[in-house]
Amino acid sequence: MKNFLKIFTVSFLTFMVLFSSLVWSYNHFLREDASEEAEPIEAVVDPNDETQVNLDELDELQRLVYQRNRVNFVVMGLEGTRSDTLMLVSFDKDTKKTYVVAIPRDTYYHRKGYDHLQKRKINSVYGDHGAGGVKTVVSDLLHDIPVDYYMSVTYKGAEAIVNSLGGVPVNIPHLMNYSDPYDTPPLKIYFEPGYQVLNGENAVKFLRYRKASPGTGAASYVDGDLGRIKAQQEFIKAALKKALSLRLPAVVSTAAKHVKTDIEITELISLATSAMGMTMSDVEMTMLPGEDRYQDNASFYFPDYQEIKALLIEIYGGEVPLEEQEITPGE
């Protein structure tokens, strides 16, 4: 799917403050009201699901959240009514340390009243509850840490942003060959292995690729969507490296036309000011802890709540207490 927006998330914070067009761009393009949630969201705890745990005691993490000067964003890549790219971007205003946590689109999240198997995947939340609902679900998934804002971008927007960078250099690891005549328009992905600079259209195709069409001799990612996420993270690094080395007025102007957010203008300026001087060494990329497996003949990515908590404590600069390292699901 259109997993493409990641090139924008951190660089947005870094360079937005540099340009006098900030306020004009914000008022005309970016600002969006996130109060679009269709109905309340209530998660279902499945007693037969070993990934669910009792999260009543979060003392260490809650203390760190209170003490640290972090701002958390949900960043979404939208394909129609689905958020088929989803991540948490956590930015520390004091240290500039930024974590990007990829959340697989098949992550299991069961909402009360949404019992169809496809509705139990996190990428279906946006279509039912809007951006505000996605913020609520991601906060619940991540042990109730605050999710302050969201940013979203569409397929065409991703192409435009990559083109404004002048393309992104990547090393294609193997022959990629995939066709879907039923897509609109019909999709054809073909890349020879080796170093290439991808324009916007080809970048989106590269980020969408997961498996080869049968009989083509091309290779699929061994671990499916998780393999694609790893390739996407390499793409992000290359894109950010190029973005941070450029004079960026054109990039900002293009991005502002295609990104929606609920960040207030005063907070936007504060974040951008805090991010000045940030480099690639300040950015850490990882993936939501969990495992990919089948349940009820459907493929899901089941979160590991114990490991998620450990990751969040690390992000917030703490150490995992010994008693927290032995959480037993269902206790």
Image: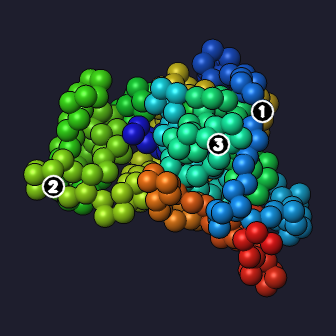
Question: Please, what secondary structure does the residue beneath circle 3 have?
Answer: strand
Q: Which residue is mark 2?
A: 218
Question: Left or right: 316 with respect to 158?
Answer: right
Q: How is the image coloured?
A: rainbow
Which residue is depicted at the point 30% across and 47% down?
209
Between the C-alphas of marks 1 and 3, the distance is 19 Å
Residue beneath the point at 36% across and 63% down: 223
Residue count near mark 1 (Cα–Cα under 10 Å), binned few <14, some 14–19, many ≥20? few
Q: Amino acid at mark 1?
A: Pro
Task: Check disc 3 and give the amino acid type.
Answer: Val
Quarter of the figure with the N terminus: top left
Tell me which residue sits at (10%, 51%) in the image: 215
CA gap between label 1 and label 2 equals 45 Å
Q: In this rendering, would 197 be left or right of 21?
A: left
* Near-viewer residue (117 or 142): 117
Say if residue 321 shows up in the picture.
yes
- Kindly indicate whether the residue at mark 3 contacts the one at mark 1 (C-beta within 8 angstroms): no
Amino acid carrying label 2: it is Ala
The quarter of the picture where residue 3 lies is top left
Q: Earlier in the sequence, mark 3 or mark 2?
A: 3
Label at residue 74: 3
Tell which circle, 1 or 3, labels the residue nearer the N-terminal end.
Answer: 1
| Mark 3 surroundings: few (<14), some (14-19) or many (≥20) residues within 10 A | many
Q: Nearer the viewer, mark 3 or mark 2?
A: 2
Q: Position of residue 310 (x, y in %)?
A: 70, 71
Q: Which mark is residue 40?
A: 1
Compared to residue 187, the image places residue 138 above or below, namely: below
Q: Nearer the viewer, residue 317 or 50?
A: 50
In the drawing, does residue 27 fall left or right of residue 94?
left
Residue 149 locus on image (x, y percent) = 72, 38
Q: Nearer the viewer, residue 229 or 66?
A: 229
The structure residue drawn at horizontal position 20% and vertical position 38%, both measured from the top left corner, is 179
